[in-house]
Image (cartoon, rainbow, N blue to C red):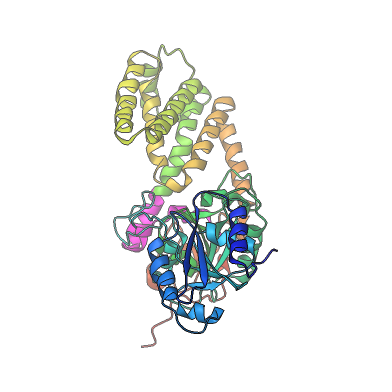
């Protein structure tokens, strides 16, 4: 821990030795008395205008007693603090702040003159709502903290910052309401964050596996959102939020599977409409996973599962096909996955053309050529559409759908039942910081069912979710009138 000396040139030489990059600049100037000063900063990340107006100009005009405290009070910069050793100074400089050295003093000032090019606050592409707030998180953690603070104007909202990454030194901010969130959950999350030893953290998804109990789980273990109003609502229920500098996606813990069937606009429409749409999402997810598998199982093993009229229609369409039902369905599903991935990765306008070509030309040609049947394409298309009703579960459910298809093609209906039982057992035994993933259905918590697949009126949600075991259980007090 080498600390600055009283010699200005030695201090500058030591900083340049630690930070030899060309974008680390030194701004030399002098006080009115002639005392030499130097500000070291990173070009492109530090606001040079603020450095000149709020730091250099006041010091050049300073005529008071030349003490470290006097220099600090003379600055017009609202954010400044005393620096530490050279390692801490180098970290502050790379973070966008400026380090101010005075000749004849072994103490330094850290100046908060950081500037970051920001994206305009807009509605996020993954959380689009018809009703409700439109603002979404951006890539700057301080801006995201301010967006959260504007929605929770309470002194109980606390932030705890942890820097992760040996090279990136990325700020990860743990957000929670002190009088609601459980202290043991907050301590556990902070402890796990401090144990992460990685080169860099480009996005919040990099730290999500380290916060889950099962790092190699097929199912997600952390909640995600890009909207500050959703994060504020989850924190009011007793959850803990995590904001990562450089990422617009916030993480929430503990996580429940039922969260992904909820949407922000559910709380801005009638409870009947919200409950109906949630059941639609759950029903659509079941269709997307099981429909291709049951279609293949019915053709190979159990024709009695299909009505006679539908069976005759399918028989007339699959007559003469060179592929077995399982291979045909697998090929069609693989084609859908390829088209989806290509349309996402391609440029916007080329992606639209690719979707049209893949859906119309390629599909119609495959049917006319006798390679694929019309029912197979119809079933896969319906399964794909239903899959996107719950976008936060696409990664998991698409893999589960493929596993169901393989089980149906190998063993039939019994394979589907066995795989379903295994997945349910896996989910039953999984938890997130003391909260079971399938709660409030397993274990059954009647009070929490009011905001699960069914949505009660706000007047009926008087208590916070019992499974989160927050300190303050009362969310809505009764009207005493």
Q: How many marks?
A: 0
Q: In which quadrant is the N terminus drawn?
A: bottom right
Q: Residue at x 38, y 83 (%)?
A: 479
Asked if residue 244 is among those painted magenta in the image, a careful observer would answer: no
Asked if residue 256 is among those painted magenta in the image, a careful observer would answer: yes
Q: In which quadrant is the C terminus drawn?
A: bottom left
Q: Is 402 rendered above or below residue 122?
A: above
Q: Is residue 440 visible?
A: no
Q: Residue at x 50, y 23 (%)?
A: 326
Q: Is residue 409 visible?
A: yes
Residues shaded magenta? 253-280
Q: Quadrant of residue 471?
A: bottom right
Q: Residue at x 50, y 63 (%)?
A: 97
Q: Is 432 rendered above or below residue 344?
A: below
Nearer to the camera, 437 or 236: 236
Main secondary structure found in the magenta portion? helix
For this orientation, the residue located farthest to the right is 1
Residue 352, image x and y in percent? 30, 32
């Amino acid at each position: 821990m080498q600390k600055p000396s009283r010699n200005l040139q030695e201090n500058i030489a030591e900083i340049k030795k630690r930070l030899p990059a060309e974008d680390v600049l030194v701004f030399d100037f002098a006080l009115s008395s002639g005392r030499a000063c130097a500000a070291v900063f990173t070009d492109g990340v530090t606001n040079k205008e603020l450095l000149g107006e709020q730091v250099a100009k006041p010091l050049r005009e300073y005529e008071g007693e030349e003490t470290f405290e006097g220099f600090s009070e003379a600055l017009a910069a609202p954010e400044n603090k005393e620096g530490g050793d050279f390692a801490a100074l180098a970290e502050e400089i790379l973070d966008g702040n400026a380090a101010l050295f005075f000749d004849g003093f072994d103490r330094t000032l850290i100046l908060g003159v950081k500037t970051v090019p920001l994206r305009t606050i807009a509605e996020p592409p993954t959380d689009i709502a018809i009703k409700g707030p439109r603002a979404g998180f951006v890539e700057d953690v301080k801006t995201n903290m301010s967006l959260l603070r504007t929605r929770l104007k309470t002194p109980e909202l606390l932030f705890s910052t942890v820097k992760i990454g040996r090279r990136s030194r990325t700020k990860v901010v743990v957000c929670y309401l002190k009088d609601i969130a459980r202290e043991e959950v907050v301590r556990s999350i902070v402890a796990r964050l401090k144990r992460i030893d990685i080169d860099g953290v480009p996005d919040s998804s990099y730290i999500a596996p380290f916060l889950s109990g099962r790092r190699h789980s097929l199912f997600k273990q952390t909640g995600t959102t890009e909207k500050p109003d959703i994060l504020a609502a989850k924190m009011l229920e007793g959850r803990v939020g995590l904001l990562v500098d450089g990422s617009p996606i916030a993480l929430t813990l503990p996580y429940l599977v039922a969260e992904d069937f909820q949407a922000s606009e559910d709380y801005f429409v009638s409870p009947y409409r919200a409950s109906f749409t949630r059941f639609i999402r759950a029903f659509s997810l079941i269709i997307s996973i099981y429909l291709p598998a049951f279609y293949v199982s019915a053709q190979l093993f159990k024709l009695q599962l299909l009505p006679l009229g539908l069976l005759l229609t399918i028989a007339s369409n699959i007559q003469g096909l060179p592929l077995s039902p399982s291979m045909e369905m697998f090929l069609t599903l693989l084609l859908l996955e390829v088209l989806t991935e290509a349309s996402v990765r391609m440029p916007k306008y080329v992606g639209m053309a690719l979707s049209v070509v893949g859906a119309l030309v390629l599909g119609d040609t495959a049917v006319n050529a006798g390679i694929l049947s019309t029912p197979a394409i119809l079933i896969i298309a319906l399964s794909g559409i239903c899959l996107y009703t719950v976008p936060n579960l696409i990664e998991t459910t698409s893999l589960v759908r493929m596993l169901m298809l393989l089980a149906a093609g190998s063993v039939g209906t019994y394979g589907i039942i066995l795989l379903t039982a295994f997945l349910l057992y896996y989910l039953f035994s999984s938890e997130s910081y003391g909260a079971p993933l399938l709660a409030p259905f397993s274990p059954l918590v009647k009070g929490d069912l009011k905001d699960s697949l069914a949505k009660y009126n706000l007047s009926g949600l008087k208590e916070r979710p019992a499974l989160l075991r927050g300190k303050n259980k009362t969310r809505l007090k009764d009207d005493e009138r």
